[in-house]
Image (cartoon, helix red, strand yellow):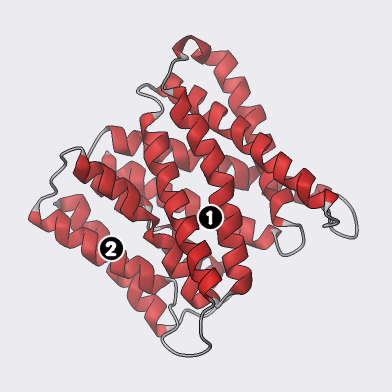
Amino acid sequence: MTALFALATSLLWGLADFGGGLLTRRTPALTVVVVSQSIAVLVLGTLVVATGAWSEAGPQLWFAVGAGLVGPVAMLAFYKALALGPMGVVSPLGSLGVAVPVGVGLVLGERPGLLQLAGIVVAVVGVVLAGGPQFRGAPVQRQAVLLTLLAAFGFGAVMALIAEASTTVTGLFLALFVQRVTNVVAGGAALYVSVRRGVPALPADGFPWGALPALAFVGLADVAANGTYAIAAQHGPVTVAAVLASLYPVVTALAARGILSERLRAVQAAGAGLALAGSLLLATG
């Protein structure tokens, strides 16, 4: 069950990142975040009311608040790092956030078996290579590296926090709702400050009404990914769940190849193969 839900997390996060990347080509990233997460809040709010999840409110929801505050900061840092580039360095570095939940699992006493340890190493190397790292070319700005490491830590912290925010399915609905409300508040405040500084919040042709289905997909896929990861982490070793969930860059690269006809570089194809091999070792170990 852990492997199944963790791999579902990778699929959902990978598709959400792909969709978000396409949307930010025409719409400011902050606007994409706020609108997509607002749609997710409406859906989650309905689920919370329908299931009576309010009854499971408790101190553990502070973990969800923490995840909601850290997430937008990590995402903005990552977008800024991508703008500074080069993307072939920034993207793989961003996947290093898996070290946070894996570290938490080890601190809590988890001890993966030999096959699982081999799977972790192979999968992490595969994910980094799947991002298409540049081994030569223009030097990387120190600011880009620092922002990417900040984003990676933030992404990993969200994974660790959301796994602690609930112990039941209905409690998970409430935790995700609280996380998304916090996302919208934090992202909305950042958007307000950005607009006050003169940065446009919308494209030149106005609000992208035609992109609403895509915005909804990005928001809901991201929520579903958080949910499947929480379930994976609760039913098995966090060290295994975190590594399998971190395979999402492979999904994003394959989506770009299949939908946009972007060609995979040799290093990316090799990385995808290693990531698959690592996931098989983790699932069977």
Q: In this figure, which residue is indicated by the disc labeled 2?
A: 123
Amino acid type, mark 1: Leu
**Seen in the image, is 62 located left or right of residue 270?**
right
Q: With respect to residue 92, does 227 lie above or below?
A: above
The residue depicted at 27 percent of the width and 38 percent of the height is 1
Whole-percent x, y for residue 139 in the image: 51, 85
Q: With respect to residue 55, does 198 lie above or below?
A: below
The residue depicted at 75 percent of the width and 46 percent of the height is 191
Whole-percent x, y for residue 204 in the image: 89, 60
Dot 2 crowding, Cα within 10 Å, few <14, some 14–19, many 20+: many
Most extreme residue toward the left, as rendered?
Answer: 114
Amino acid type, mark 2: Ala
- The one nearer the camera, 65 or 12, is 65
- The one nearer the camera, 172 or 148, is 148
The residue depicted at 35 percent of the width and 34 percent of the height is 231
User: In whole angstroms, how far apart are the C-alphas of marks 2 and 1?
Assistant: 19 Å
Can you tell which mark lies on residue 15?
A: 1
**Seen in the image, is 178 located left or right of residue 25?**
left
Whole-percent x, y for residue 274 in the image: 28, 70
Secondary structure under badge 2?
A: helix
Q: Which image quadrant for residue 217?
A: top right
Of mark 2 and mark 1, the one earlier in the sequence is 1
The residue depicted at 84 percent of the width and 58 percent of the height is 203
